[in-house]
Image (spheres, grey):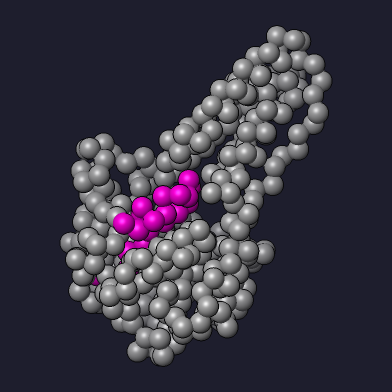
């Protein structure tokens, strides 16, 4: 599903580590949301978090799909929509058409959950389930294969500015990461509620990927950019010293060379790896030999750095076999091979775990 073009407003380039900050606009000036979204983008937020409440599932009322659609035109950042509503299946098409990038619904709703998750993934968006503080993580097990996001609520949903429930985070966040361990790339654990500079290190130390930050960013006189950088850095530090033996986490934007192969074999490996959800890029290897035909030159197979270990475990032997095949092909004088077209990246609902 094609989304409307995004504006070309400048975004600050900042070094990125592991943690991401989603700026929740629930405590922003709701009378000027376009300004709030542009400000969060300008100050370095990684995405915009939109809490949609219906006054029934939670005791508050915010906005709907038309507001999401209007904000889509105001920012290039991903829109992370959290549907705290009783009947998400009834409205899901409207929110997908509005241009959100990720959609998270609640596991506590009374209507069937699986059809809505499948609709989100079929549209090429990331699908998530959120759970209230009292809901056990085991409630997500039936939907595990369909999840890209697990959102752990560390406050009661409905209002901003509540205190962080540390025991809920300890019980669920790291376990949620294990719940998503079957996904080789892209799965995210979000923590929503009471996230600020005092709680960020603990949350990062539990392997959370996305910290949803609301009231801490919108306090009068607060330097939003500094707050975002501080929360992100504290979360990464928590991960480094709690889970990673003091080694800094691999930045999410790091790219590594997984293999160097002739084009037909590089594309073959690319298609196989991408079917598991790991994105792959191919670039011409070596110098700029403009006279060297693409079909006989080497190509670098590039992967996201955080996915390298999973790719090695799943495809290491396959890669080595293709390297040997490439050597034999060159030794034979590079005979003509069938043309391998660039693979089409699969949709989320087409991935093979």
Position of residue 217 measured from the top left corner of the image (x, y, whole percent): 29, 68
Residue at screen point 57% across, 83% down:
90
| Residue 226 visible | no
Q: Residue 159 colored magenta?
A: no
* On screen, residue 112 above or below 147: below
Q: Looking at the picture, tell me which residue is in the foreground, 215 or 102.
A: 102
Residue at screen point 30% across, 59% down:
173
Position of residue 340 measured from the top left corner of the image (x, y, whole percent): 76, 34
Q: Quadrant of residue 319?
A: top right
Give the total number of marks visible in the rendering.
0
Left or right of 341, for residue 238 = left
* On screen, residue 36 above or below 289: below
Position of residue 228 measured from the top left corner of the image (x, y, whole percent): 30, 59
Q: Residue 189 colored magenta?
A: yes
| Residue 250 visible | yes
Residue at screen point 35% across, 89% down:
59
Q: Looking at the picture, tell me which residue is in the foreground, 110 or 116.
A: 110
Position of residue 306 measured from the top left corner of the image (x, y, whole percent): 42, 41
Q: Give the range drawn in magenta.
A: 175-194
Looking at the rendered image, the quarter that the N terminus falls into is: bottom right
Residue at screen point 39% across, 56% down:
179
Left or right of 335, for residue 235 = left
């Amino acid at each position: 599903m094609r989304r409307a073009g995004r504006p070309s407003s400048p975004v600050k380039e900042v070094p990125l580590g592991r943690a991401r900050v989603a700026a929740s606009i629930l405590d922003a000036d709701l009378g000027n949301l376009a300004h709030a979204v542009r400000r969060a983008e300008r100050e370095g937020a990684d995405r915009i978090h939109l809490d949609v409440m219906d006054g029934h599932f939670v005791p508050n009322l915010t906005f709907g799909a038309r507001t999401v659609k209007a904000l889509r035109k105001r920012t290039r950042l991903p829109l992370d929509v959290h549907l705290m509503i009783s009947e998400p299946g009834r409205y899901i098409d409207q929110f997908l058409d509005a241009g959100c990038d990720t959609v998270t619904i609640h596991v506590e709703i009374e209507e069937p959950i699986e059809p809505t998750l499948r609709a989100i993934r079929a549209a090429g968006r990331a699908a998530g389930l959120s759970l209230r503080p009292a809901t056990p993580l085991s409630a997500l097990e039936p939907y595990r294969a369909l999840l890209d996001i697990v959102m752990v609520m560390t406050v009661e949903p409905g209002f901003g500015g509540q205190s962080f429930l540390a025991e809920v985070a300890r019980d669920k966040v790291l376990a949620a990461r294990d719940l998503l361990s079957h996904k080789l790339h892209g799965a995210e654990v979000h923590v929503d509620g009471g996230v600020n500079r005092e709680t960020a290190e603990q949350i990062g130390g539990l392997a959370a990927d996305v910290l949803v930050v609301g009231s801490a960013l919108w306090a009068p006189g607060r330097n939003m950019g500094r707050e975002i950088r501080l929360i992100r850095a504290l979360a990464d530090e928590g991960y480094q010293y709690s889970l990673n033996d003091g080694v800094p986490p691999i930045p999410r934007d790091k790219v590594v060379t997984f293999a160097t192969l002739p084009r037909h074999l590089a594309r073959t490996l690319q298609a196989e790896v991408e079917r598991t959800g790991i994105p792959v890029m191919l670039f011409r290897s070596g110098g700029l030999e403009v006279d060297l035909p693409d079909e006989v030159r080497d190509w670098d197979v590039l992967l996201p750095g955080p996915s390298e270990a999973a790719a090695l475990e799943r495809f290491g032997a396959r890669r080595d076999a293709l390297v040997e095949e490439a050597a034999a092909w060159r030794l034979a004088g590079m005979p003509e091979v069938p043309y391998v077209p660039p693979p089409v990246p699969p949709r989320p609902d087409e991935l093979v775990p």
